[in-house]
Image (spheres, coloured by chain):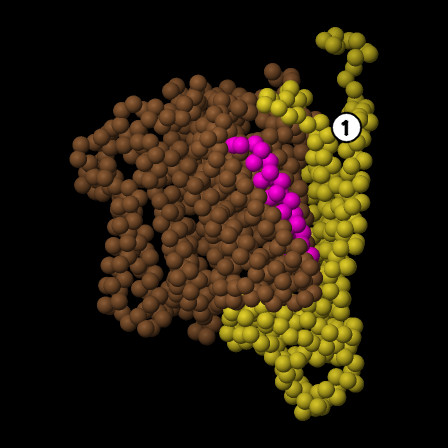
Chain colours: A yellow, B brown
Amino acid sequence: MSDQHDVTELEPTPGERFRKAINSRDVKITMVFGVIITAVFVIIGLWFYPKYMPEIMSENMKRGKDVIVYFTVISAPIAGLVIAVALYTLLDRHHGENPPEEAASFRTHTPIVFAWTVVSAIFCIVAIVWGLTEMNVNSEDATENAKSALVVEVTGSQWVWTFNYPELGVQSEQLNLPLDRPVEFRVHSVDVNHSFWPVQLGVKVDANDRVTTLAHTTPDVLGTIDIKCAELCGLYHAYMETQGKVMKEADFNSWVTAQGGHAA
Amino acid sequence: MTTLDHAKVSESRPNPPKSLITKLNMGTGMIVGIVFAEAMYFWGKSMWDRQEAVMENRILTLSMFAWCIGFLIGIGAFIGPFRWLIGKDLTDEEQLFLAGKGQGVSRYFRYCTDHKVVGIQYLVGVMVMLGAGGTMAMMIRTNLITPGSKWVNAEIYNSLVGLHGITMIVAMIIVSTGPFGNFILPIMIGARDMAFPRLNALSWWLLFTAIPVLCSAWFFGGIPTGWTAYAPLSVQAGAGMNAFIVTIIIFAISSAIAGANITTTVVAMRAKGMKWNRVPIFVIGATMSVALAIPAFPSFMASQMMAGFDRTIGTHFYDAEFGGSGWLYAHLFWIMGHPEVYVILIPGVAILMEIAPVFARSPLFSYTTAVVGFAGIVGLSVLVWAHHMYISGWMPSLNGPFMVTTEMISIPTGLLFLVLLGTIWRGRPWMKLPMLGVYALIWNFLIGGITGIYLSDVPADDYLHGSMFVTAHFHYTLMGAALTGAIAGLAYWFPKMTGRMLDERSGYISFWTVQIGFQVLFLGMFAAGSQGQPRRVADYEQAFATSDLISTIGAYLVGIGMIVLLYSVVHSWRKGKIAPMNPWGAKTLEWTVPYPIYLENFHEAPVVTSDPYGYGRSEK
């Protein structure tokens, strides 16, 4: 071993060491675990969120849900690796009153630390770029639709939502929206903070006293919207909810007329 | 080898002649505190009209502060400083008495400067707080067992949510750095006590005075605002809010004192030869955690002082009607609030990094990576607060930058996983109670971390913000990771702190009941949140019924498991198996001292020649 000139005992090259490590039994078993667990997480992501999240009634909601599903899929290999390593170590456990024999002593392993950091940085950048892109699409949609948007003034007060359509001269405790028409919610509160959450539309914005905050979306499916308050606002916070409807343009216009407004 | 006779710590009980110090204890503190509070109350009532809300708030707030000051005077916290004013100091005999020399159990009820006594005081205090907060959690889940349940009314429910939150947050901030940071940390670095023993006692007794104040909130109408106490909801709240404000201000002072003390101790009092790269990782983690708290908590304190001014002298910091802003509160709160979750998390992870090498008999994998991971989290954590305000309407244009900083935290967090995995890889894990915590953390923190990435993403947060999904996420990190770390730490250091082993059988039962219950509870809650159930609701619709029922069943399992743990701790403390000096074969310094630990820890100052992770075959 100490004889530096012996050709047969040269240090293995990094490539050889890597191949040997990959082919060792523990790495192989861990990789099998990893693949199985990754698959489980992917299935959970693809099945769970679409099943349990409410109906998608706007592009905003679709983007939010997609982010959750894709992030689950992307993070599945990481979760798979982490759990696989932990599970593999559990295969050979030690019980009893005395410590087990000493394990192999390795203090650090620079290539692994380096690779781990680089890979997690790449995953992080993917997540950031993805999120920024989706966020940007949301705000571009909002800017594009600003002119043609139906304005709805949303007022939060303890513990009711009131909806005012200034262009149509209608005020109501029921939120009705025409299909496929962009809408701009102008939200404020007359007392404490509330948070306006039309669940199926996938947007949410706080209602603050004396400040108007905006939320933009375009409902693109007919149906019922659950409207909730997502910020603790006092005694009956839990009951500060109502329902809204996305309806055909003609139905919406006749509702507006019935309410004494002038249909656009 | 070891004996549990406290008197053996020292044969002679010092008895300073006619010193006031010997007469003071928790009882006198309470008497003086109550007298002060009553005096303040009646004086205030004679000065101001109690019918007005502002005046009532003023009287109550001042009375609560008077209680705290009175208690500290009554327990003798200010005797030393007072002597300095008249140009003297405590005599040596008095100092020894303060250090609890030869006093048996009674020193736990005094203003005792011994760091080991303070550590035990913190441990018992934390257990009481966790018990109270846990009971409230059970009540919350009981009310949510079915939709439309009227087990408690909405008013009581909201108060339960607020009190559960703040009690648990306070308990979790001190759960590791309080008991272990005070008891174990000085011994680990070979110090004879903390750098400032009297401040150490002060930090504990200050915290103690806050507990009755917080409890009093029940009798003044509760804290119906959640633990965040957002303005202007808090302005509207009844007199119980004053208790919250006083509690936070006192707690901020207490934690600043404790933080400065631990930091100084670690910087200045390490044993000879303990260079920075030989410091045990728990010490590094605890120090970073308290050092992060030092800049963070003053912001919380400032937010509550301003809330207090709004309530007691009629300012309008948070009142939009007079030009104030609720966003100001939200900023001040979250500038503390996000670093704070890492103040809670880091010591828990660091404890498990201390445990993993011992039970896998393998060196801590890449010590430098662990330190870099902690430092990265600490550095980034002060730059992410506004991710709690994505949908508040404040500056939507800044959501992008805050999303970037928030998601970057996943990189140093990933390094912590690498350290733990590298340590246990190719070792044979010794499946003792502390080691189970390492595996529980890996699973729980993974779930908590990944769901955190969804929440950091703005389009996803547009949907998930303010839902039960958030509640489940932070319980996975704070309870699943940080509390698991603290409980593992208790199992690990129990022999050193009490001289007895923690009972294994009840420990295992508790571990599995809690962990399984925990998964049921919060996976159910993730489902409820995904379905669209807002958090902090006293009632909900039929659509969420299954998820909530599952959550409640899980919660009861956790509750049962925690009761078993409590039994295990109490039983083992009284009658457990006597522990040998180093039951785990660990290499840190605290395992070189026998129980009961000598008053100043070491007969001979230890000299350190290597880091404490020399496990493994080649380094035998």
Which residue, given by chain and number where applicable, does mark 1 sit on?
Answer: A26
On the image, the x and y values in percent for residue B287 come to 48, 38
Locate the C terminus of chain B and report the quarter of the image it occupies: top right
Task: Identify the magenta region.
Answer: B502-527
In the image, residue A173 lies at what x, y percent? 63, 81
For the point 60% across and 76% down, which residue is it? A161
Residue found at x 42% / y 44% = B125
Q: Dividing the picture into quarters, in which one does residue B238 lie?
A: bottom left
Task: Answer with the quarter of the image where residue B62 lies.
Answer: bottom left
Q: Position of residue B465 (x, y in %)?
A: 63, 61
Could you classify mark 1 by the number of other residues whose Cα lies within 10 Å: few (under 14), some (14-19), or many (20 or more)? Answer: some
Q: For this rendering, which residue is in front, B516 or A55?
A: B516
Specify the amino acid type for callout 1. Answer: Asp
Magenta-drawn stretch contains B13: no
**Is A6 on the left or on the right of B332, as rendered?**
right
Tell me: residue B230, above or below residue B411: below
- SS majority, magenta: helix
The correct choice, above or below, for A200 with respect to B124 in the image is below
Q: Residue at x 25, y 28 (%)?
A: B14
Q: Is residue B506 left or right of residue B12?
A: right
Indicate the chain on which mark 1 is placed.
Answer: A
Residue B461 in sight from this viewpoint: no
User: Relative to residue B358, is residue B443 depicted above or below?
Assistant: below
